[in-house]
Each structure stands twice: as C-alpha cells, then as structure tokens.
Image: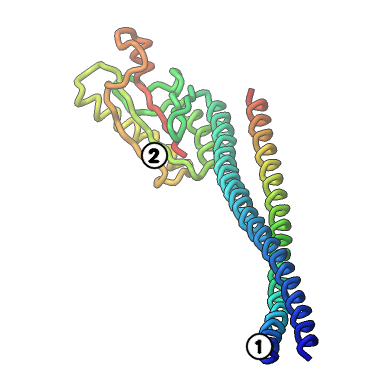
Amino acid sequence: MKKILLGLLIVAALSACSSSEKNMDMSTQIQTLNETVEMNKKILAEIKSINETSREELAACEKGAVMMIEEMKMLEAFQGTGATVKTVDNGLHLTLPIGTSFPSGKAMLNEKMEMLLDTITTSLMAYPQTNVMIKGNADITGPEEFNQKLSEERAMAVSTYLIDKGVDSSRIETMGVGSTNPINDNKTQEGRMANRRVDLIIEY
Amino acid sequence: MKKILLGLLIVVALSACSSPEKKMDMQMEVRTLNETISTQKSDYEMFKAEAKELEDQMHQLRKQIDDARDEKR
C-alpha cells in the first residue's frame, strides 16, 4: 500500500511540475505580447499625432490658397480699372490715374473719374466681402485747413458716387489727409494735378 | 508514514488540479492580447492610408497653387 501511495505521489508531483513549466512558457508569451501591445500603442499614438498635424497644415494651406487665388483675381480685376494697384496688408491700394484728377480747389468728379469709378464699382460688387477706405488728397496750394476740408470733400464725393451706383454705404469709409501725402512734386503744375486725387484702399 | 504520504499525495494532486485553471486563464489572456494586436495592426493600416491620403491632398494643393501662379504670370 505504501509503495502504491509513493508511486501515485511521484506521478502527481511530475504532473504538477510539467504544468508549472507550461505555465512559465505562457507567462513569457503573455509578457512578450504585453510589450508588443505597449510598443504598438506608442507607434499608433505617434502616427495619429503626425496625421493630426498634417490635417491642420492642410487646412491652413487650403485657407491660404483660397485667399491667394481670391487676391490674385481681385488684383487682376482692379488692375483692369486703369488705376495703379499695389498689394498692401489685407488689401489693395489703388492710386487713380492723373487724368482723373480734381480741378484745383474743387471736389468735383470729372467724366474720366466717373468712368473709372464705374469700373471700380463693378469690381466692388463682384467682391461683396470687401470694404473700401477712400482717402482724399489735396495739393499744397492754399492753407492746410482749407486743404484738409477739401480732401475730405473729395473723399466724400467719391463715396457718394459709389453709393449712388449701388455699393452699400456700410462698406465705405472716408477720410481726408489734406496735402500731407503727395505722390508728386508740388512745385510743378503736373505734380500738383497728380496730388489732387483720391486713393482707394480695398480691404478684404 | 502512510498518513504522511497520503497527505502529500492530496497536496500535490490539488496543486496539479489548480494548474489547468490557471492555464485556461492564461490562454484566454493570450487570445485577448493577440486580438488587441490584430486591432492595432488594422488601426496602423488605417492611419497609414490616411497619411498617404493627406500627403496626396497636400501635393494636389501645391500643384493647384503653382498652376494659379503660372497662370498669373
């Protein structure tokens, strides 16, 4: 009986040992798998972050491209008006040609100016999101107080014309800068003519 | 002596019995981990495809910008 029990004990002990070894193997496998899962998590987080950054860059690029294309179209449209067009921060600066100058001491629009403003109106209507700042100028002749008032009246005359042609008044701002911003020599007649002008800043 | 041997036999036999349960748990864990890895692989493929798509979109956008510039010139 004793021998039988001893034999059974040995068999049971061996069986327990073999199971224990198998469990050890599986534990190693689990550990390896856990390590793989953790490593994969890091890689996935990294790719996700890279994709997120790329998405943001793409959105910014798309916005920039749309703005650039719009700006180019607008530049082209206003260049067609005969005015000198320069790109400035958030807009375009239009200097009207010399033929559109105001008569000395007056804020009256001549025919050439009206024709030019008609073309500008068309462009403004095509870009309803834009606003216009009209800056009136005067030459150096006469007292500055008078020139200041005259420059404001010139800006106002252009504004009234644009409003009459259908541009919403809420889009227009006016200001006069007197004779402080000449673009030409005030000593010559031609220079003074060039200085009796309005500048338009189209903001978008 | 007989009693001692019988006691030992019971202890060892119980220990051998508890192992299959443990093994079952471990097998289950291995299966779960393998499934997790498989899901991670799918996610990786999805992110890779997304990265490729974003790259293509960026390329296309750059081309459109260049074309617009050329047209302007």
Q: Amino acid at mark 2?
A: Thr
| Residue drawn where x is 58% and y is 40% of the image | A61
Residue tagged 2? A160
- The CA span between labels 2 and 1 is 116 Å
Chain containing mark 2: A
Q: As displayed, is residue B36 above or below residue A141? A: below
Numbered-mark total: 2
Instruction: Classify mark 2: helix, strand or loop.
Output: helix
Residue B58 lies, in percent from the top left, at: 65, 40
Comparing marks 2 and 1, which lies closer to the viewer? 1
Give me the residue at 67% from left, 58% from top. A32
Front residue (pair B22, A159): B22
- The image quarter containing residue B41 is bottom right
Which quarter of the picture shows residue B1? bottom right
Quadrant position of residue A156: top left
Indicate the position of residue A195 as horizontal and vertical percent values. Answer: 35, 18
Q: Amino acid at mark 1?
A: Ile
Tag 1 secondary structure: helix
Q: Which residue is mark 1?
A: B4
